[in-house]
Image (cartoon, rainbow, N blue to C red):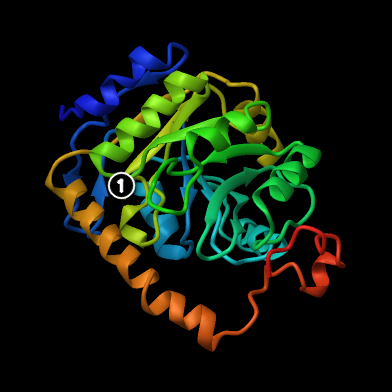
Amino acid sequence: MAGDAGLKTLADTCQRSVSQTAETETPNGSTGLALTVQPEGYAVDLHVKVLDEGVVERAKARGLDALVYAPHFTRLPEIRRQADAFSDEELTVFPAREVFTGTWQQRRHVLAIGLEEPIPDFITFDGAMRELDRQDAAVLVPHPGFLNVSLGLDDIEAYDDVIDALEVYNPKQLSHHRDRAQSFTSETGHEPFVSSYAHVRGTVGEAYVTFAEAFEDVAAISTALKNDVERSLFHRDGLSHDIRRAVEWAHLGLENTWGKFDRLMLQGTEPTHPDHVAYSGRFDDVKVY
């Protein structure tokens, strides 16, 4: 069994969590996918950006029971529609929103699970956190302290009572990012989580969380996360995992060059902009553009 010392030390800083590493995957030549030993418990990849038939096939091959789907700049009704379309008896897709707060230059991302009403991007961080608190959604901090798209320790402490968990591992994070994230959980006492943060199909299931019980709907998983239900954290290791991480980094470079130019210069107003008619002007007082 391959190990990752950085993740194993998480158990020392978060007493209510058990962190382990999944057994080394074995290739499956017939499907081109990789399989691993069936995870024990209810296995959830808590943050993916992609969703199609290939993603569903890969998630099932990895032994996952559920995905949390939170694509960028997509309105909540559409996320719900896609999540429902790709859910079946073997795999549940839970809809979520990674809210893009602030401006492009000073942005902070927050993952919300269990929203009742749509919330736009491009609003102030404080405005977003107040709205998430009002809706009583589970509030997770993806990639804390990562580049310029994350919450820092001051942000987390300022909304200690609203935030429910901090991400301590995804394939994009380097070792110093993971160390920083784990130090944040130690200092604040927040529960940790991991995810694949998959922007490309092959990364789905590279990191996941298991729970003792299954969740029937998004409200149930939101409640579990808000109540700090015990969880176990897993990620893969080895050459295959390193390759997946490199692919995700390459995608990050593309997303922040051509992808950003495309969004800013070619596509016009995002569907999650607070001026969109869907938000009925409710966020005019906190929009940044």
Residue at (64, 22) in percent of width and height: 227
Residue 81 drawn above or below residue 180: below
Residue 187 drawn above or below residue 203: above
Residue at (46, 61) in percent of width and height: 50
Label 1 amino acid?
A: Pro
Residue 202: tell me if it is visible: yes
Quarter placement of the N terminus: top left
Q: Is disc 1 placed on a helix, strand or loop?
A: loop
Nearer the observer, 205 or 138: 138
From the viewer's perspective, tell me whether residue 183 is left or right of residue 219. Answer: left
Q: Quadrant of residue 135?
A: top right
Residue at (38, 25) in percent of width and height: 183
Q: Residue furthest left?
A: 239
Residue bearing mark 1: 171
Q: Residues within 10 Å of mark 1 (few under 14, many from 20)?
A: many
From the viewer's perspective, tell me whether residue 31 is left or right of residue 99. Answer: left
- Give how far across and how far down residue 222 sits, in percent: 66, 35
Marker count (numbered)? 1
- Give how far across and how far down residue 283 sits, in percent: 80, 60
Quarter placement of the C terminus: bottom right
Residue 161 drawn above or below residue 110: above
Residue 40: tell me if it is visible: no
- Give how far across and how far down residue 133 sits, in percent: 75, 37
